[in-house]
Image (cartoon, rainbow, N blue to C red):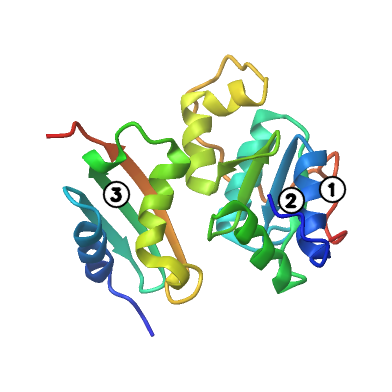
Amino acid sequence: MSVSPDELKDRIEAAIPGTRAAVTGDGHHFEATVEGPAFAGLSRIAQHKLVYDVFGAELGDRIHALSLKITPTEAR
Amino acid sequence: MSDSPSNPMREAIQSAISENPVILFMKGTPEAPACGFSARTVAVLEAVDRPFAAVNILPDPAIRQELSAISGWPTIPQLFVDGELVGGCDIVTEMYQTGELQKLLGVETAEAGAEAPEPAAHHETAPLSIENLL
């Protein structure tokens, strides 16, 4: 079953407060640009895990690949 | 760290991570990557010009399962340096572009900040390869 980029965008933004996401993809492989205060002060590993955790076991399965570009922003 | 003696696959992976200062778990081999993300990560490591060990996770699904259980990282490739997970393709590429990867690997190059290299059509054999040992 294919996944829409909008679904990924909505789920990232819903799960991580204050986050804005832009997602492109072909239904299986996706690229997401994500920014938000939740990433500030975290290591790269921790930043990526925060987003991976939104999708859990769907990654590598329903969502074949998710490439991430994460930018921390100032907490408001 | 689990030291359960009943899980030889997990122990083999943990040994490989601790015994190799730079080790990449990937789909396929450095000479014949089976996935674009693995290919790009290999290309970055080869551009840094530091020997690395490589493990092909494809021959046995248990490799990937145990690896992700150890690292808490769901996707492949995964690069470990000095026993620590550095990240996957995105992070390795980003760190190469900022020069952090070169610093981490103890290789200072004048070209830090260079464009990420494209995967080459074919690769030199990695100096150390332990694929299929697991």
Q: Secondary structure at mark 2?
A: loop
Please give the name of the residue rendered at 80% of the width and 56% of the height, measured from the top-left corner: B11
Residue mark closest to the camera, 1 vs 2: 1
Badge 1 vs badge 3, beta-carbon distance below 8 Å: no
Please give the name of the residue rendered at 65% of the width and 67% of the height, measured from the top-left corner: B65
Q: Are marks 2 and 3 on the same chain?
A: no
Does B111 sit left or right of A12 as displayed? Answer: right
Q: Quadrant of residue B128?
A: top right
Badge 1 vs badge 2, beta-carbon distance below 8 Å: yes
Marks 1 and 3, Cα distance to the nearest angstrom?
Answer: 34 Å
Q: Chain of mark 3?
A: A
Which class describes the residues within 10 Å of circle 1: few (<14), some (14-19), or many (20+)?
some
Nearer the observer, B129 or B6: B6
Q: Amino acid at mark 1?
A: Ser
Report the residue that reaches farthest toward the bottom: A1
Marks 1 and 2, Cα distance to the nearest angstrom?
Answer: 9 Å
For the question of whether residue A15 can be seen, the reply is yes
Report the residue that reaches farthest toward the left: A76
Please give the name of the residue rendered at 66% of the width and 26% of the height, measured from the top-left corner: B105
Which class describes the residues within 10 Å of circle 3: few (<14), some (14-19), or many (20+)?
some
Q: Position of residue A48 (x, y in %)?
A: 41, 48
Does B63 sit left or right of B91 as displayed? Answer: right
**Residue on which disc 3 sits:** A33
Q: Position of residue B109 (x, y in %)?
A: 61, 17
Marks 2 and 3, Cα distance to the nearest angstrom?
Answer: 28 Å
Which class describes the residues within 10 Å of circle 2: few (<14), some (14-19), or many (20+)?
many
Nearer the observer, A57 or B87: A57
Quadrant location, the C terminus of chain A = top left
Residue B129 is labelled as: 1
**Residue on which disc 2 sits:** B30
Q: Amino acid at mark 2?
A: Pro
